Image (cartoon, rainbow, N blue to C red):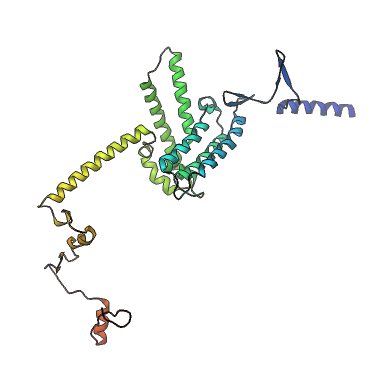
Amino acid sequence: MNSHIQTYTHIHKNIRLVQQQVLPPGSHLVVSGTRIEVGDTLKYLGLTLDGRWSFRAHFQKLAPKLLKTAGALSRLMPNLGGPSSPCRRLYMGVVRSMTLYGAPVWYDALSRENKLVLRRAQRHLAVRVVRGYRTVSAEAALALAGSMPWDLDALVLAAVHKWRGDQRSQGQRPAPREIDAERLRLEEDAVARWRERLDDSTYGRRTTGAIAPVLNEWVMASSEEAWQAVLTFCEAVISQKEAAEREREADPTAPMIRRKRLGRRRRNYHLHLPLPDGSRTTDTGVSPGPATAPRVTPRAVRCVVGGTAPSPPQRPGGLPN
């Protein structure tokens, strides 16, 4: 009876050893006289591979590296002062490049756990980009920063890589313009998925609800070329508005409020504003208008009711103004 129990225990341990893929200590191979240690992972071209191609070990090693780099860059981006927004986006792009290295290879094996690793590092940097606090949700921080979730960026890279491979397998070599057009189409699809996430988000509803309808326009200036196009458009619009305003100010037939304001603008501007009764104020007082009445202050009312005439306000020390 005891021998059967020992045999069963030995078989059970061997089965568990095979299931867990635990290698015996000191396992190695000898190739041309060179000793090569045998492990459960292999690093090849910057990617950590395991026996199941799950890339779990890759993200386990990548996570602390991303968080360490994000923490170091965050110290360069304080909420008050610090670098400008373009510089902050540049720092965020450094970590993004580290994260998305090899994305066409590992995207199909991207699990929910691995997505959380990417999300944690991206949120940490997005909060610094928008000069927010730790209480800002990930959805709101990414939306304000105009940074698409990195798993969607990985989806775009993987889809472009697959499309180019399919084209080459058919004997076609797509031109750079065609590749850019396909990438733009895939990015638009990714932005649509991002918008669906913002609509379904639980936290930061006010922020995400305000940005989601104009999400395409919000992220349109993600590249230098796109930003230059937006900048040129804004300069043209502002120049036209300024030219129209100068013509309006020089027009003698324009209403007084639309003409050029002389002297101190803030002091003279209110003189041309109409009063509630329709009259206008001038430098010498109130111009005649319908229902013109003297101004009565609450202090004057109190003095008349009490039977005394209102006295001028006194300065400190009893001297009248």
Q: Is residue 168 visible?
A: yes
User: Relative to 279, does residue 43 appear above or below in the rendering?
Assistant: above
Between 172 and 8, the one lying in front of the other is 172
In the figure, is residue 157 to the left or right of 221?
A: right
Which quarter of the picture shows residue 211?
top left
Q: Is residue 1 visible?
A: no
Which residue is the extreme one toward the left? 253
Of residues 22 and 268, the one nearer the viewer is: 268
Above/below status of 251 relative to 191: below
Image x and y of residue 254, in percent: 12, 52
- Position of residue 288 in the picture relative to residue 266 (left or right): left
Answer left or right for 10 relative to 180: right
Q: Is residue 194 above or below residue 22?
A: below
Residue with the most extreme bottom position: 307
The residue depicted at 52 percent of the width and 32 percent of the height is 98
The structure residue drawn at horizontal position 22% and vertical position 62%, both measured from the top left corner, is: 267
**In the rendering, at what x and y percent does residue 152 appear?**
47, 33
- Image quarter of the C terminus: bottom left
Q: What is the quadrant of residue 218 in the picture?
A: top left
- Front residue of 87/304: it is 87
Taking the spot 57% from the left edge, 39% from the top edge, the residue there is 68
Q: Is residue 250 above or below residue 196?
A: below
Q: In the rendered picture of this protein, how many numbered marks are placed on residues?
A: 0
